[in-house]
Amino acid sequence: MGFFATLNPEQLGLVQRARQASEPFAIGACFDQALAALRRDFWNIVLVHLVFIVVAGVVIFTPPLVLGLARFNAKSLRGQPAGFSDLFSGLDDFLDAWLLFLVAVPLLIVGYALCLLPGIYLATSWSLAFGLLAEKRGTFWECLELSRQVVTPHWGWAFLLPIVAGFVSGLGAVACGVGVLATLPLGSLMLEASHQRVCVPPAA
């Protein structure tokens, strides 16, 4: 096996579906889906994100909780019951979450050190890796490569979406910081919405 993981037929099918997806990283559509989810279950979503911020401050828990938050957000976007058990479910995949983190972060640092552009490319290309690992689409290494191949056809929009989502998340700071309780989850849900749009087939 070379530097990049070899994907299995199921994973390659997801890549093919991503190539044919219509504007999966469309900012307006992701915002609308995130806002609908937040309106549907506002306090639950806010509380789970608040707990995430507090507990993820303990570094050893950060990667597994990112995994769990992806699962929570995915359920919230689909209108399914979601709660703290989903957030902490990432602890069941503690090792895989940390392996993904420990492989991706040093490579990103090297990429940013090499004239910045390689780091930007990898950060964008791997933006779906934790979500794919949360769905158990493969090993941590396969999820990094799967994310790269899924994102590549839509790279420009995939690069722009986190910038806009970050701006949305920070808007709450203008209301003495209180508004962040709503805008931070909204930005988080926008990112997961793009993952759902590109990687999860629509219901029949």
Image: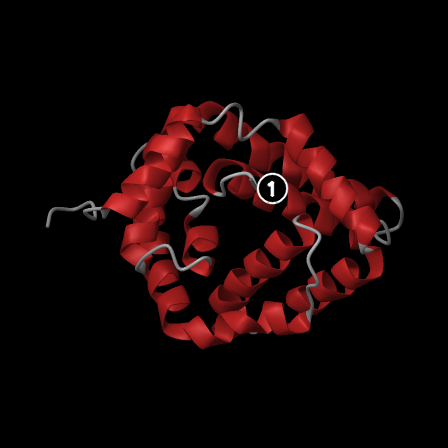
Q: Residues within 10 Å of mark 1 (few under 14, many from 20)?
A: many
On the image, the x and y values in percent for residue 74 come to 60, 53
On the image, the x and y values in percent for residue 184 come to 72, 50
Report the residue at 63% width, 74% height from top: 85
Counting the numbered discs, the total is 1
On the image, the x and y values in percent for residue 179 come to 85, 49
Q: Is 99 left or right of 75, judged from the image as shown? A: left
Image: 193 above or below 67: above
Viewer-nearest residue: 108 or 45: 45
Report the residue at 66% width, 64% height from top: 53
Residue type marked 1:
Ala
Q: Is 59 left or right of 83, judged from the image as shown? A: left
- Pick out the residue farthest to the front: 204
Quarter of the image that includes the C terminus: top right
The answer to whether any part of residue 172 appears in the image is: yes
Image: 112 above or below 179: above
Question: How is the model colour-coded?
Answer: secondary structure
- Pick out the residue farthest to the left: 1
**Residue 41 sits in which quadrant?**
bottom right
Image: 109 above or below 80: above
**Disc 1: which residue:** 193
The answer to whether any part of residue 113 appears in the image is: no
